[in-house]
Image (spheres, rainbow, N blue to C red):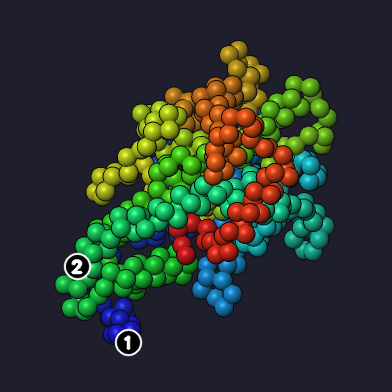
Amino acid sequence: MFAILKLLLLSISSQLNADQGFDVRRHLCTVTRYDVAKDIANASAVAANNIPNGCTPIHVNLVGWKYSWRGKLKGGELIRKGEEELYNLGIRIRERFSELFDEEYHPDVYPIKATQVPRASASAVAFGMGLLSEKGGLGPAQHRAFAVTSEIPASDIILRFHDCCGNYKDFKKTQEPAVDKLKEPVLDEITSALVSRYGLKFTRQDTATLWSLCKQEASVLDITDQACGLFSPSEVALLEWADDLELFILKGYGNSINYRMGVPLLEDVVHSMEQAIKANEEKHPPGSYEKARLRFAHAETVVPFTCLLGLFLEGSEFQKIQREEPLELPPKPPQSRNWRGSTVAPFAGNNMLVLHSCPANSASKYFVQVLHNEQPIPMTGCNGSDFCPFEEFKEKIVAPHLKHDYDSVCTAKLEEPEQKPASSKLSQLFRCLLSLQNDDTRSTKDGLYK
C-alpha cells in the first residue's frame, strides 16, 4: 500500500495546480508559517499605522509562541526556519520602536521571559539575538549576552497556565472525542472523493494521515505537489475548517474556561502598563524603569490571550463572551469566517500591546494599540478601533474577565462560602504539582498536533 501511495504521490497531476491562484501554505491552520501568515495579514490590513501626531510609545508587551517540528531523531527543537523568523522579528521590533530600544540593555528594562520548554527558551534567545544585534562586542556580529528567565513549570500560571488548570484538562479530555466526531463527516466526504479519483481503498485514517503529511511538507519543506497534491482546493478548505473547529473548541472561544484560565497573564500585562504610566508621570530617569516585557510560550498561551482581548469577533459575539454565552461554531466553507488558525496562531504568532503617551489629548493621555502578528487589529470591545484609551481598555475589555481568578476557574470545587480562594504562591504551587502529578502524559504539542 505504501509503495502504491509513493508512486501515486510522485506521478499524479497535482490537484492544487488546477487553480494557479491557490496556495495551500495559506490554509494550514496553526502549522502555517509566519512569513506566509504575514502575507495574509498584509493583504487584509485596513490601515498600516493610525497613530495620532504627538503620541509616542512608552512600553511594549509581547506574547509569542513557536511551533517545533518532530521530524528529526529528537523532536521538539526549534528548526532553522523558526530561528530565522524569531531573529528577524526581534530586528523589526527594534527598528519599529527605536525610541523604546535606544537604551543600554538591562534585564530590568527589557525582561525576556520564557517557559521552561527548550523550544520556547530557544525562541527567546533567537529573538533576543535579533533585538540586541550590533549592541555588544561579541564576535564579528557584535552580539551581547542577555538574560532569559523562567518560572518553574509547577508555578508558572502566567505563561503555562494550561498545564496547571485541572478543570481545563478535564474539559479538554472530555471534548476531544466529540471534536473527532465533528470532523468525521469532513474526512469521510474527502475520503470518498479520493477513492473515486484515484481508485485506491483510502480510509478515513489514511486521509487524516495524508493531510498531516501535507501540512508538514508544505510548511516546513515548501513541498506542495506531493501529499498536498492529492487534495483539491475545496478539499483543503474543508480540512482547514475542520482544524479551525478543533482550535476554536479546545483552545479558543468554544468554552470560556479556555481563555478565563489566562487571566493571570492579562493581569500581568495590565500591571506592567500601569507601572509604565507611573514611571512616565513621575518622570523616572532613563534606565530605572521597564520599557518592554517580552514573553515566549506556546499556542495554548497565545490563543487564550487573543480571546481575552476579544480579537477576531463580530460586535454581537463580543457581548456574548462578556456574558459567558457560547458562540456559534465558525461557518463551513465557502462561507467566510473571522476565525482562521492560519491567522490567529501561525508559527511564531504573537500579540503586542503598545502603550502610547499622548499628552496633547484632552480626553485621555494614554492609549493602547494591539498588534496581532505585527499588524494593527480592531478591538471589538473598543468600538472596532485598534487604538484604545487605556482606561476604556481596562473597563470594557479587561475588567469583565477579572471577576474570575485563576483558582476559581481551575480548581475542581469552585465555591466554598466559608473559605476564600487561596492565592499565595505556595498554594498555587501545591495545586499545580498535584495537577502535573495526575497528568503523566502531559502534552508536548504546541498547537493542534499530537
Residue shown at 47%/65% (left/top)?
Answer: 450
Residue reaching furthest top? 362
Q: Tell me if 408 is positioned left or right of 209 in this view.
A: right
Q: Tell me if 431 is positioned left or right of 233 in this view.
A: right
Crowd band around label 2 with a 10 angstrom C-alpha radius: few (<14), some (14–19), many (20+): some
Q: Secondary structure at mark 1?
A: helix
How many numbered markers are drawn? 2
Q: x, y percentage for residue 117?
A: 64, 60
Q: Label 1 belongs to which residue?
A: 3
Whole-number angstrom distance, CA of label 2 to CA of label 1: 21 Å
Q: x, y percentage for residue 235?
A: 26, 61
Mark 2 touching mark 1, by CB under 8 A?
no
Tell me the amino acid under the disc marked 1. Answer: Ala
When the figure is inspected, residue 139 is found, relative to residue 4, above or below; the finding is: above
Residue shown at 32%/44% (left/top)?
Answer: 329
Q: Secondary structure at mark 2?
A: helix
- Residue 193's label in the rendered image is 2
Q: Who comes first in sequence, dot 2 or dot 1?
A: 1
Between 414 and 128, the residue placed more toward the observer is 414
When the figure is inspected, residue 203 is found, relative to residue 302, above or below; the finding is: below
**Placement of the N terminus among the 4 image quadrants:** bottom left
Between 313 and 388, the residue placed more toward the observer is 313
Residue shown at 53%/61% (left/top)?
Answer: 443
